Amino acid sequence: MSKFSETIELSLEGNQNNSDRRIMLFDLDLRGHHTIYIQHLLRYWCQQEMAGHLDVVVSPEFCQQHLNIVNIAHNHKNINFVAISPREQAVLKSLDSFSNRILRAFQEWHLIYKYADYLRTTQCLIMCFDPVLFRVALGTKSPCPFSGIYFRPIFHYVNFTNYIPSWREHIWHWRDKLCLSRILSNSQLQTLFCLDSFAVKSLKKSFAGKVVHLADPVPTPNQSQLQSERLKESLNIDNHRQVFLLFGSLSRRKGIFQLLEAILLLPSTLCQKLCLVLSGVPDPAAEKELIESKITAVCQSQPVQIISFYEFIPEPDVQAYFNLADVVLAPYQRHVGMSGILLLAAAAQKPVLSSNYGLMGELVQNYKLGLAVDSTVPAEIAKGLNQFLLKSPSQLCDLSSLKAFVEQSSVEKFASTVFQYL
């Protein structure tokens, strides 16, 4: 029996009091914000000495790769980490392809039901509700009331500036509206948290009380300028260059290839001022060779400095990269939903060169976070780079708006909002 299974059995023995709430957090994803959200919620639970039990259902890989988070439970008898079985994880991985997403949704909901029932959960929070949206809309029973965090609504994008939907996005609009009307009428749904305040405003017209805006959290920066200077020195960045940072998963979805194409379109005199820092893990890993070949081609054609660091950056070290940057890049390719990159940049008081699409584009323009361009077109990215290289980056954003944007997204507010509505 694994130590996680042992934890379940020991905890269940003492869970005879019906008035003692037992909350289950369910998240099988290892990427980006998923692990950070769990960490924030656990820390808040401990700091507030909250009553009841907290079970965190995760993948086996989570328990192996994020021991710093799992160890939080070791000092708190009312927090348990529960790993799904390797066989259950294998079934989910076999359904990872786009064509199998509906089958995966059914399997994921099956696991939510199974573990909520087994753990005698009184309230369940599905940390990423999007994958099971369609499954829940079809109608299903849960062993307990449930809530979910909804990341990527798109039905309201028609209200955004210059938005022109594709035929596929028209289908997504219809799907979202149909699914949400059914889900929000489900008596077992307690709260639908949503990162998109514009979507919340629209949904509240019909479903006030069940929909709550949950601001994406960003930690308060606590690193000194000296740490950033040391990082700049360790990366061997030329002193006369402006630093443009592309951070996180280095993937097609984040526009890395359009960005490299854009640099080829810049005048060589401007490239002499530019240092591009690529910090993150190529996704998928097989793309690393292609990224490297593109970087080589750009550096052979332009007098630009490109520094690549293909490693996962631990959370305590992340802010140093944003403090180092003059401009933060977010050239996502028609990305639906929020990006923590905007918040990390704002926390460091740095402007962004972002996609003008959807929620990200709307936030950049409303809060004056920097420049928003059509990032699917390299020439438009090049125009944005050109402006930042010719002007002081601080001239292309509003520093007071950056501060206001961050203040509404504190870690404490995020965690307190979640537990308030559970």
Image (spheres, grey):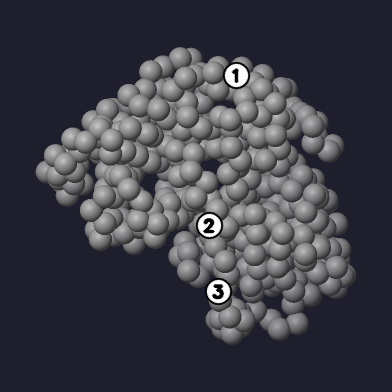
The residue at 63%/28% (across/down) is 208
Q: Between tags 2 and 3, which lies in front? A: 2
Give me the residue at 53% from left, 66% from top: 318
Q: Which mark is residue 222?
A: 3
* Residue 274 sits above or below residue 141 on the image: below
- State whether residue 252 appears in this view: no
**Residue to which mark 2 is pinned:** 411
Q: Position of residue 419 (x, y in %)?
A: 45, 45
- Give yes or no for contact between labels 2 and 1 (Cβ–Cβ under 8 Å): no
For image coordinates 14% across by 44% down, the residue present is 10
Q: Is residue 246 above or below residue 153?
A: below
Using residue 316 as the reference point, say whether residue 198 is left or right of it.
Answer: right
Q: Quadrant of the N terminus?
A: top left
In the picture, the disc for residue 181 is 1
From what the image shows, is residue 227 above or below residue 39?
Answer: below
Image position, residue 121 (x, y; %): 30, 33
User: Circle 1 — which element?
Assistant: helix
Q: Secondary structure at mark 3?
A: loop
Amino acid residing under circle 3 = Asn
The residue type indicated by label 2 comes to: Val
